[in-house]
Amino acid sequence: MNIHHRILSCALSLIASGPIASTQVFAWQAEKITDGLEIPWGLAYVDDGSMLLTEKAGVIKHIDLKTGDQNTLFRLPNVWAKGQGGLLDIALSPFELGKFYVTYSKDVDGEGVTTLASATYKADKVSNWQDVFVSKSRTDTGRHFGSRITFDDSHLYFSIGDRGDRDNGQDTLTHAGSILRLNSDGSTPNDNPFTDNDKVLNEIWSFGHRNPQGLFYDIPAQKLWSIEHGPRGGDEINLIKAGANYGWPVTSHGKEYWGPISVGESETKDGIEPPVKVYVPSIAPGSLIVYQGDKFPELKGKLLAGALKLTHINIVTVNEQGEAVKEERILEDLGERIRDIETSPDGDIYFSTDNGNLYRLKK
């Protein structure tokens, strides 16, 4: 296809967040790599020159990052592409060469079930497709699927939204509203927090989540981070701990859609893990990474989230105590719903947008 590289200059304005806020301004740019994609939901790097990309309708593509050329590799069977459901995240396995994982909503008797699948990518072909884990989250609603994939040194994590049913957040006999921890083959690790509790599904690592669409394990710091949608206000960044309850819908900083009434019993409550950062109004987060590359030293160790509703990249500085101490918003002038952000092996940052574009972040 024809590639249209264009650079969009956008101002980075630093947003005041406490006493250390700054008025300094840096220039960031978005370089378009390719366009014409259909809601490019997930990105995964093959190497510095190419990536695999998911389209929500159920297609996996290969993208040449130098030319922008697109090549369709695979079309998912039995994908339930309705509402927020469809083919979601993609991630290369750190455990097996050539293997990758995806999350998708599987069509089971006309309803959507969040499912983890794996396949092999080799010689420009996808093979060995199989479902690794089919969650207990089946409903006919097209809302709140999550879902991102991340890895620590030996395990896989992925998130599932509450599927639009608030009660699922505190119902530990469903996987909806939870973050799961699995072995690479889809089995349950023996040291998961609830393996001896018959009132909680063994795969659950944490619960009380509304719709976590960003999930990232920071290996150097050994911390698992998530970012999730609140209702009307109340998006949250959470530091995820084994066995913790993150409150939804008992606690929330958001309001009801139908009026200025607080959701839940309170903003915080004993026994519930409080968020590290809350967004009011909502930014509608689509993804999350911790930048550990060397190309942009000013971003090292910071959290980067794509914002859908407020159309920018959100940068959050976290101190050693795990507290959010500064927020920055860049590329606001781009005006696009930023869906996924990923770091390439050499430290480049690429991001996709719901308009069907793939960009590289530049200074």
Image: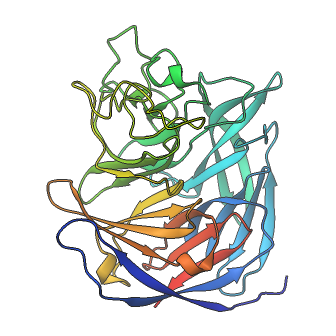
Q: Quadrant of residue 335?
A: bottom right
In depth, the one of 244 and 294 nearer the eye is: 244
Percent coordinates x, y for residue 2 in the rendering? 83, 87
Residue at the (48%, 42%) spot, across then down: 230
For residue 196, above or below residue 251: above
Percent coordinates x, y for residue 202 in the rendering? 42, 20
Does residue 48 appear anywhere in the picture? no
Percent coordinates x, y for residue 119 in the rendering? 66, 48
Judged left or right of residue 48, residue 290 is: left
In depth, the one of 51 and 275 nearer the eye is: 275
The residue lying furthest to the top in this view is 198
For residue 315, above or below residue 73: below
Judged left or right of residue 124, residue 266 is: left
The quadrant of the rendering that contains the N terminus is: bottom right
Residue at the (49%, 14%) spot, across then down: 173
The residue lying furthest to the front in this view is 260
Percent coordinates x, y for residue 13 in the rendering? 40, 81
Residue at the (20%, 53%) spot, across then down: 322
The type of colouring in the image is: rainbow
Does residue 97 appear anywhere in the picture? yes
Count of numbered tags? 0
Q: Quadrant of residue 91?
A: bottom right
In depth, the one of 134 and 34 nearer the eye is: 34
